[in-house]
Amino acid sequence: MITEGINESNKHQIYTHSLRPESIGDTKRSSFLEIFNSTAKEYVQDNRPCEYFDLADSTGHIGYKSAIYYCNKESNRLELGNVSDESKCIRIKLSKGGSLLVNRDNIDELLMSISMFSAKDQGLIMQAVMKDKIATEARKREETRDDTKDLIDLVSSDDK
């Protein structure tokens, strides 16, 4: 092995990479994880303005067919129905930015006015509605199963 020109002190040095940020003087280097996490956070937040805000009137409402959407620019979302309790709502990320928040009681209005949305957003809306319907049915089945089990336990405890 040729070792000419190599300093003896550098000859056996092992190079490692740390995922923790290291301070070098007054500057701080970003680690791979910090860069990855900040990029992932930006992707999930999606700060692009909702493209449908342009359709709103001066009060921030969009009336289309049987639905009246409200443009919430602070939250960057379209809202349909009473969205004060988000546990009763479906959130749909829109393809070109922003999101759609719909109360489950207003799904019929959403489906009647779905032609307002782009083809890609229509697909996203239909997927979200179907997934929510499946999840709701599964929850109901689980509750029914629990009620049946409680009833069986109650009847069997009376027999003893």
Image (cartoon, rainbow, N blue to C red):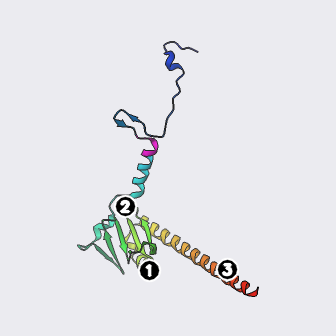
Q: Nearer the viewer, residue 110 or 80?
A: 80
**Contact between labelled residues 2 and 1, with CB atoms less than 8 Å apart:** no
Q: Nearer the viewer, residue 14 or 99?
A: 14
Residue 22: percent from left, percent from top: 42, 37
Q: Residues within 10 Å of mark 3 (few under 14, many from 20)?
A: few
Kindly indicate the quadrant of the structure image that contains residue 43: bottom left
Residue appearing at x 56%, y 14% in the figure: 2
Residue 133: percent from left, percent from top: 53, 74
Q: Is residue 28 left or right of residue 138?
A: left
Magenta span of residues = 30-34
Q: Is residue 4 above or below residue 39?
A: above
Nearer mark to the viewer, of 1 and 2? 1
Element at badge 3? Answer: helix
- Amino acid type indicated by mark 3: Lys
* The residue positioned farthest toward the right in the image shown: 160
Mark 1 — residue? 105
Mark 3 — residue? 149
Q: Separation of disc 3 and disc 1 at Cα?
A: 30 Å
Mark 2 — residue? 97
| Tally of numbered tags | 3
Nearer mark to the viewer, of 2 and 3? 3
Q: Separation of disc 2 and disc 3 at Cα?
A: 46 Å
Element at badge 2? Answer: loop
Element at badge 1? Answer: helix
Earlier in the chain: of badge 1 and badge 2, it is: 2
